[in-house]
Image (tube, rainbow, N blue to C red):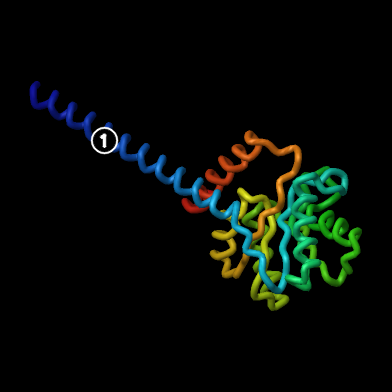
Amino acid sequence: MGSTWRGRSWGRWIAGLVLFLGIGAAGFWVRWVDAQIKICAVEDQAAPADAIVVFGAAQYDGRPSLAFRARLDHALALYRRGLAPLLITLGGEGGDADQFSEGEVGKSYLMGTGVDEDEIIAETHSRNTEDSVRRLAVIARANHLHRLIVVSDATHLFRLRALCAAHGLNVLTSPRPRVPVEGYSGELARTVHEIASYTLWRLHLH
């Protein structure tokens, strides 16, 4: 009876220790990823490259959302600085009833600012960030693009760097400016999303 009780006590103690260590490791991981996201968010690496890549965001009836427009305007500013001769817009349709893809909306917006159509490549089929990076790698190989400037939300860039590196892409990241409607809660939500998405990707679960 006594040995059985001691065995159960040891089992509970070991289970508690494993749980404690697991929670501690998870907490350390979350803090580390959060720190990497914040470091990338404030680092603008923009420098001469072969193309400037704009990752898609929400669009409404063919018009870019404020966040998407901020990405496009930032890419346009880099383009006008002469940092690259080519712009690439990424992103498929938002849903079954959506008639516009993020890639084509981005291209139309840039053309409306005076950029020549021949200087824009629109990718219009990707469904998420990882799919966009895979398709970007195909575009880069087909067009012999060796160095890319990647434009997206500041909190998005750490995961993008990792995904692009995994697909053999040499990228420089450049965060878009903040838009007026953003606040702390929105940034926190994006950060939590990025921590979860990056973790799932590293675990090969996403």
The structure residue drawn at horizontal position 66% and vertical position 37%, both measured from the top left corner, is: 186
The structure residue drawn at horizontal position 85% and vertical position 60%, both measured from the top left corner, is: 110
Q: Please identify the quadrant where the N terminus is shown.
A: top left
Residue 184: % across, % down: 63, 36
Residue 11: % across, % down: 21, 32
Please tell me which residue lies in front, 73 or 95.
73
Position of residue 202 relative to residue 138, above or below, is above
Residue 128: % across, % down: 67, 51
Please tell me which residue lies in front, 196 or 182.
182
Please tell me which residue lies in front, 145 or 31.
31
Image quadrant where residue 6 sits: top left
- Give amino acid for label 1: Leu
Q: Secondary structure at mark 1?
A: helix
Number of residue marks? 1
Q: Is residue 91 left or right of residue 191?
A: right
Image quadrant where residue 66 sits: top right
* Residue at numbered disc 1: 17
The structure residue drawn at horizontal position 56% and vertical position 40%, both measured from the top left corner, is: 192
